[in-house]
Amino acid sequence: MGMKPGAGMKADAVVVGAGVVGAAVARALAVSGRRVVIVEQGVPGGAVSGASLACIGTHMMDEDELPLLKWCCDEWAAFASVAPDFEYSRCGQLRFLKQESERRSADEWIGIETAAGLSPTLLDPDAVRRIEPELTGPIHAATWSPNSAVVNPFLAVRRLLEAAQAAGATLVSRRPVTALRLAGGRIAGVETAEGPIEAGIVVLAGGPWTAKLAATAGVDLPIVPRKAQCLATVSVPPSIRTVVGACKAEGGVDAGYTQIQQAMSGQILFNTVLEGGVTAAGSPDDIPEVDRAFIRDSVATLLFLFPAFVQIDLLRSWVRYEAVTPDDRFLTGPAGPDGLFIAAGDGGTGFVRSLGMARIIADFVGGRESPFRRDLYDPARFDMKAAA
Ligand SMILES: Cc1cc2nc3c(=O)[nH]c(=O)nc-3n(C[C@H](O)[C@H](O)[C@H](O)COP(=O)(O)OP(=O)(O)OC[C@H]3O[C@@H](n4cnc5c(N)ncnc54)[C@H](O)[C@@H]3O)c2cc1C
């Protein structure tokens, strides 16, 4: 099915990047009848998407984005019911509070989400242990968001690409797009090391590399790379049932970020970030080792919550770069010359939002309204220079 990769390719739309966002965009465009070529410089899912903890949820997220996030959670569930297995598990999410002073923040989150039609609750430690028996550390309480799910990130990207290919899309891996092609002031395709691909629509879903590519068409995007790190233990018998994180509140460990869960392989995946990790000067092409302080803090938080895990060995660690915008929302929609669309700027929660970003692009291309606010993601909300 589709076209043979090589010089002289033509398509209705080229999607640059086969992370979860590009895969979702390719699927949405192919399903709506466009001839799509998706071009990936490395291997599909090999950048931040495959490194993800891939929690699909609405808890303690941007209030304005809740309608989109709810829509995305439903779409992921619907996709899981039709696609071959990608380890989708609706396991729920707990956010622990260390002390009484965090109650106000927890109550505020619960109020906001309840008003949006969600059903988070606050649990005392005994109730928490009924859901998560090994969580025996001295927490004050935890919020509980039952609608959160997790997926296997590699398999999820693969399933989206398979769905795109089944609808006629062509995937070209290991081929960097080197520049955008313009003709008569509008997009005419992309340049690659092995020749151009002609298309009237180009969607940039290149994660932290997106700004560099947009600049080849004179479009300036405010996206910077941010280091994201993770640890994994050896496989152990089932011990963690949910996604466990810290309540977003002022002060202490909770000012940072914690996420702990167990993969179906049995590995416990976890990270705790106490300080901001924005590395605007860094390059997503250079992948350093994880920081020692990150390992120390992450292990300390894991053992604070799950003291019985003290004997479990660490297996591996990894670092990838997320794409961050000034307001942590995606840049999704048309930008610069006619025919150019952006879908990047995941802000660290791009897995859950990928299907919504794909819907926005498909709606723009198809001239339809979207079932949620898309002005929130308008790339033009920041200063942007278009080509002269
Ligand atoms: C440890 C960790 C935990 C996370 N946990 C969660 C979570 O629980 N929930 C959640 O929603 N999100 C989570 N995230 C974030 C989520 O993984 C990302 O937001 C999401 O994967 C971003 O997808 P993407 O497709 O935009 O980017 P990427 O996966 O980086 O994909 C971009 C692709 O574009 C390709 N590309 C770039 N430039 C070019 C070019 N010029 N030519 C060809 N190809 C190009 C790249 O090679 C890459 O494959 C987590 C991330 C990490 C690292």
Image (cartoon, rainbow, N blue to C red):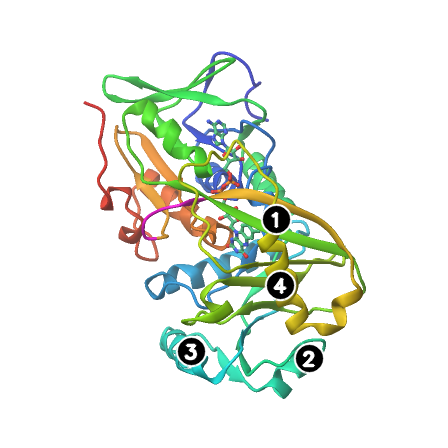
Q: Residue under circle 4? A: 260
Q: Which mark is residue 126?
A: none
Q: Quadrant of the N terminus?
A: top right
Which residue is pictured at 37% across the width and 52% down the height? Answer: 328
From the image, tell me which residue sits under label 3.
110
Query: On screen, 382 above or below 110?
Result: above
Q: Is residue 205 magenta?
A: no
Look at the numbered disc 4 and give the secondary structure of its residue.
Answer: strand
Kindly indicate whether the residue at mark 1 contacts the one at mark 2 (C-beta within 8 angstroms). no
Nearest the eye: 276 or 106: 276
Q: Amino acid at mark 3?
A: Ile
Q: Is mark 1 within 8 Å of ligand 1?
A: yes
Q: Which numbered disc flags the more N-terminal residue, 2 or 4?
A: 2
The residue where tag 1 is placed is: 153
- Tell me if label 4 and label 3 are in contact, CB under 8 Å: no
In the rendered image, which quarter is residue 286 located in? top right
Work out whether residue 339 or residue 101 is closer to the camera in this orientation and state it: 101
Taking the spot 58% from the left edge, 48% from the top edge, the residue there is 291
Q: Which residue is mark 2?
A: 136
